[in-house]
Each structure stands twice: as structure tokens, then as C-alpha cells.
Amino acid sequence: MNASAAARPRAPRGASLARRLGPTRLERLLAECAALAERDDTAFAVTLLAGTPTHEGRESEALRRWAAAAARFGTDLAADAAEGDPPRVVERSGGLDRDVPLLARYRSRPEPTVEVFVDTVALAEELIGLLGWRDLYPRGSVRAAALAHEAGHHRLHDPAVKRRLRVALDHPVLRLGRWRLLGHVAGADEIAAHAYAGAALGLGRGPLLVTAALARAVAALRED
């Protein structure tokens, strides 16, 4: 803890985000999030891919092409009716205790299940209110987007859908004459799931903006 943090009275954990941050950190967070809102969703997707292992040294143009293709795939997938039963939903806390805040998580075994982390959802909703982003993300849309995102992962778990995504990404790793072997693009499924959620809910912006803003808010809170 730095000296300024030690001199600042600490708000109780259950206090509002604004109170816990204090005026100075809150002002800085609002400015940072306003700057984030100036970026488009493709820029966030490219950043996600660039930070994914195996993409070190990739050309930015390739990352941008894959990001756009994965987003289009997720958007189109949301327009197709899902087959089969949706995954089971379980609510938990502890999403803010992780290195990277976690809104929800999909588990395929022992049965398809989506875990929603209610503490992270509540903080994201509060942050959206502070930022004045309700026109982009109506109240309740964080939980809905988290569920839709993991539902997208559930659908992407289908081998046939995986193959379609691989074709859409068009990343050949081996060529023999006219025959090509298409490779996996790490992180593309995450971008597709984000786009799936945004399209399924008709949000003003994709969930990647909220995810980035939430990460900034959690980092600010951890400065204590």
C-alpha cells in the first residue's frame, strides 16, 4: 500500500463504487472509461487476440481480419435458432477474487452449466450507471449478456459449429496443391461468443467494452 492510500480512510467493502474509490480515483476511472468508449469493438477484439498465447509476433492485419471474421460468425450464429436444451445456470460469488474479474463461466462437464458470478455482475451494473452507459446497456443486461455469452460458448462447443468457425477464419496451416488444412485461431471463439451475446440481446455496444471498463474499475479498487 502506498502512502496516499494509507492516509485515505478506507470505505467498507459493501459501500458504493464511488465511495470506495474516492473523488480522485473515480474521476480518473471515468476518464479512462470514456477513452475506452471511443474505441470500436473490433479494436477490443484485436487486443484480445494479440494478448492470447500463440499470437506473439502476428501481423496486426491478420489479427484484425480474424477478429472481424469471428465477430461476424458470432453475430450470424445468434440469428440461427439453437437446437437442444440450454445449459443449466448456477449463481456463485467470488468472481472479483480472481486475477481477472469473471462475470460467468461455461463448463461442458459433467453437464453443460453456466456459472454466473453475482458479485462481478453487480459491480458491472453499478459501473454502467456511473458511466451513463444505460443507453448502451439497459439495466439487467450484464447478467443477460453473461448468460448469452456462455450460451454462445455452449453452441461453439458443437464440432460442426467449430468447423464452420474454422472455415470462416480461413487460417491455412498446411497446403498440398489445392488442398488446405485450416488451423485453430486461439481466442477467436471468445470474440465470437462476445459478438453472439451482443447480437442476441441487441445491445448498443458489444460486451467487450463493459469487460474492459470493469477491468479498469477492479484495478482501481485494488490500489488500496
Image (cartoon, rainbow, N blue to C red):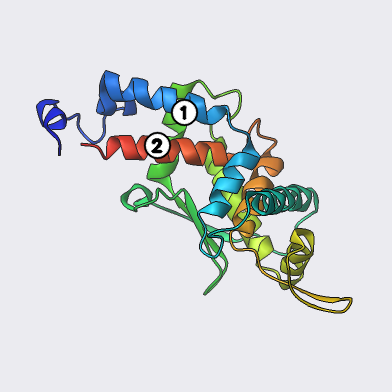
Query: Which residue is pictured at 71% across the width and 42% down the height?
Result: 199
Task: Find residue 36 and report its horizontal and vertical position in percent.
Answer: 51, 31
**Secondary structure beneath label 2:** helix
Check disc 2 and give the amino acid type.
Arg
The residue singled out by tag 1 in the image is: 33
Q: Nearer the viewer, residue 157 or 216?
A: 216
Query: Which residue is pictured at 36% across the width and 24% down the height?
Result: 28
Residues at marks 2 and 1, CA–CA distance in whole angstroms: 8 Å
Q: Residue 24 falls in which quadrant of the image?
A: top left
Task: Find residue 116 and report its horizontal and vertical position in percent.
Answer: 47, 51
- State whether residue 150 appears in this view: yes
- State whether residue 122 appears in this view: no
Q: Residue 42, relative to residue 163: is it above or below?
A: above
- Relative placement, left or right, of 126 versus 76 is left
Check disc 1 and give the amino acid type.
Cys
- Is the residue under label 1 in contact with that under label 2 (CB below 8 Å)? yes
Residue farthest to the right, as pictured? 178
**Secondary structure beneath label 1:** helix
Q: How crowded is mark 1: few (under 14 residues within 10 Å), some or many (20 or more)?
A: some
Q: In which quarter of the image is the N terminus?
A: top left
- Relative placement, left or right, of 160 versus 189 is right
- Relative placement, left or right, of 97 versus 108 is left
Task: Find residue 21 and report its horizontal and vertical position in percent.
Answer: 28, 27
The residue singled out by tag 2 in the image is: 216
Q: Which of 219 and 144 is in front in this view?
A: 219
Say which label, 2 or 1, has the lower sequence index: 1
Q: Which of 32 and 164 is in front in this view?
A: 32
Q: Nearer the viewer, residue 113 or 99?
A: 99
